């Protein structure tokens, strides 16, 4: 029995089985590469669900973390700390928003956004107590808490977890008519992803975000975008909504790459007016805005800006898309994406994408299936053309080999 198998067996014994990971054990990462406990090297095409856009263990982010760890790591929000202000200043400046509220995980940030828009609905819009409605879209992914699975249409996320949080209205993604029909006097917000990641890299029609924002504006409804996966360079823009000229959200939710994968850091951003609903004592987090996370977050943002990672994602994403489209196979139904956020949809009669991801693992390429039939490609944004060439060669080989066996 190998050392890796020992660790896998130990994990299976002691951990709840709420994940189905690929059968390897990683112990080290650098840039686009990760290594398992046997020393095998892999190109990471998942980036921890877009949390390591800057690459694994980016030295500038690690330096910021280690330097801050020598000073102070946690103060709670009972006191000011010297790191949160500069971090939020940089974040707001890059996002062109007035204020930010720092949290830790993505799901916490989504929950915070829900609290913000509901409170705005009652105190600013004038919705009657406990009547606020939030429109969400089918096949969304906003987290795994009870409230966020209450927003979901995915049966596996909801089965035997009820009763659910009320107040959410589900409509089809990319459907402006459905949005207009769902709005009532009690509607306080539309919350959606600008590109649906877990649904299989689903992209709305050109101009959809702008039109959805306009409908929200006309009806005094807040337009909220969850950019936890799509933000911070992943889709070829700093934020995905910037692919359209007039799609700026009222509330922006960010996380994951906000720390470069080093520490849980998330936030919501909004105008002064919306953020004014938060007054002392009504919302908080022991770790949210802590000096360690803030120092890491500031360094992570500077790396994205200094290394022009959004621009790299745009250029290299186009290159990767062209290379993938040139693969001679009838196994691919569709290739779609923005920047380095790409989904390869396989024929449904092939039995799903999992076996292809497992085969790619044996060739040194790590990726994960999503929505059963889609291979998601989301490498760190520091990847180079030569790595993309090698990546596509492995994908083409696996598609050919599996075809030959079937």
Image: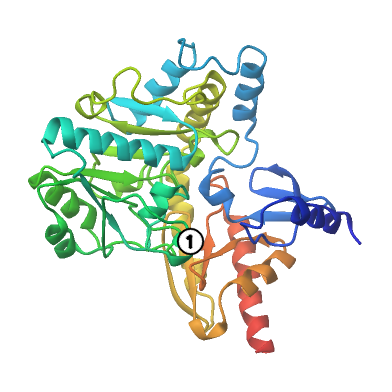
Task: List x then y, in percent, for residue 10.
Answer: 81, 52
Vertical placement of 291 versus 318: above or below? above
Question: Considering the image in quadrants, where does the C terminus appear?
Answer: bottom right
Vertical placement of 307 versus 84: above or below? below
Task: List x then y, in percent, for residue 228.
Answer: 43, 44
**Closest to the observer, 314 or 69:** 69
Task: List x then y, in percent, for residue 150.
Answer: 37, 54
- Count of labels in the image: 1
Instruction: Label 1: state its secondary structure.
Output: loop
Question: Considering the image in quadrants, where does the N terminus appear?
Answer: bottom right
Q: Quadrant of residue 29?
A: top right
- The residue at the point 56 percent across, 45 percent down is 382
Label 1: few (<14), some or many (≥20) within 10 Å? few
Outermost residue, right side: 1
> Label 1 belongs to which residue?
160
Q: Is residue 153 left or right of residue 80?
A: left
Image color mode: rainbow
Q: Is residue 393 left or right of residue 110?
A: right
- Quick check: can you spot residue 265? yes
Vertical placement of 310 versus 182: above or below? above
- The residue at the point 66 percent across, 59 percent down is 21
**Closest to the observer, 124 or 359:** 124
- Quick check: can you spot residue 142? no
**Closest to the observer, 325 or 178:** 178
Task: List x then y, in percent, for residue 256.
Answer: 50, 41
- The residue at the point 59 percent across, 56 percent down is 45
Q: Is residue 352 left or right of residue 148?
A: right
């Amino acid at each position: 029995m190998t050392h890796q198998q020992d660790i896998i067996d130990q994990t299976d014994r002691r951990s709840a089985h709420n994940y189905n990971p690929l059968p390897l054990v990683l112990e080290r990462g650098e840039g686009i590469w990760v290594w398992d406990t046997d020393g095998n090297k892999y190109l990471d095409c998942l980036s921890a669900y877009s949390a390591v856009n800057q690459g694994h263990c980016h030295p500038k982010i690690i330096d910021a973390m280690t330097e801050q760890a020598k000073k102070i790591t946690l103060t709670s929000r009972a006191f000011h700390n010297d790191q949160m202000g500069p971090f939020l200043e940089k974040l707001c400046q890059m996002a062109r928003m007035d204020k930010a509220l720092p949290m830790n995980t993505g799901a916490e940030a989504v929950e915070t956004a829900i609290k913000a828009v509901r409170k705005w609905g009652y105190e600013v819009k004038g919705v009657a107590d406990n009547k606020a409605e939030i429109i969400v879209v089918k096949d969304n992914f906003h987290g795994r808490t009870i409230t966020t699975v209450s927003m979901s249409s995915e049966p596996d996320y909801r089965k035997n977890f009820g009763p659910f949080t009320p107040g959410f209205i589900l409509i089809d993604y990319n459907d402006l008519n459905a949005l207009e029909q769902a709005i009532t006097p009690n509607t306080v917000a539309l919350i959606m992803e600008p590109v649906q990641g877990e649904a299989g890299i689903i992209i709305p029609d050109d101009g959809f975000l702008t039109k959805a924002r306009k409908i929200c504006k006309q009806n005094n409804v807040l337009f909220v975008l969850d950019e936890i996966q799509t933000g911070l360079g992943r889709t070829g823009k700093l934020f995905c909504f910037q692919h359209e000229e007039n799609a700026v959200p009222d509330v922006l939710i960010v996380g994951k790459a906000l720390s470069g994968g080093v520490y849980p850091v998330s936030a919501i951003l909004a105008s002064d007016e919306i953020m004014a609903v938060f007054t002392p004592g009504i919302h908080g987090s022991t770790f949210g805005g802590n000096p360690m996370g803030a120092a890491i977050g500031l360094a992570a943002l500077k790396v994205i800006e200094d290394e022009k990672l959004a621009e790299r994602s745009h250029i290299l994403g186009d290159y990767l898309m062209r290379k993938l489209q040139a693969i001679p196979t009838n196994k691919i139904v569709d290739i779609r994406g923005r920047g380095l956020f790409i989904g390869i949809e396989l024929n449904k009669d092939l039995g799903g994408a999992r076996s292809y991801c497992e085969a790619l693992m044996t060739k040194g390429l790590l990726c994960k299936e999503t929505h059963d039939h889609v291979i998601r490609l989301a490498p760190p944004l520091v990847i180079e053309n030569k790595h993309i060439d090698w990546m596509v060669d492995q994908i083409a080989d696996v598609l050919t080999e599996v075809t030959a066996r079937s």
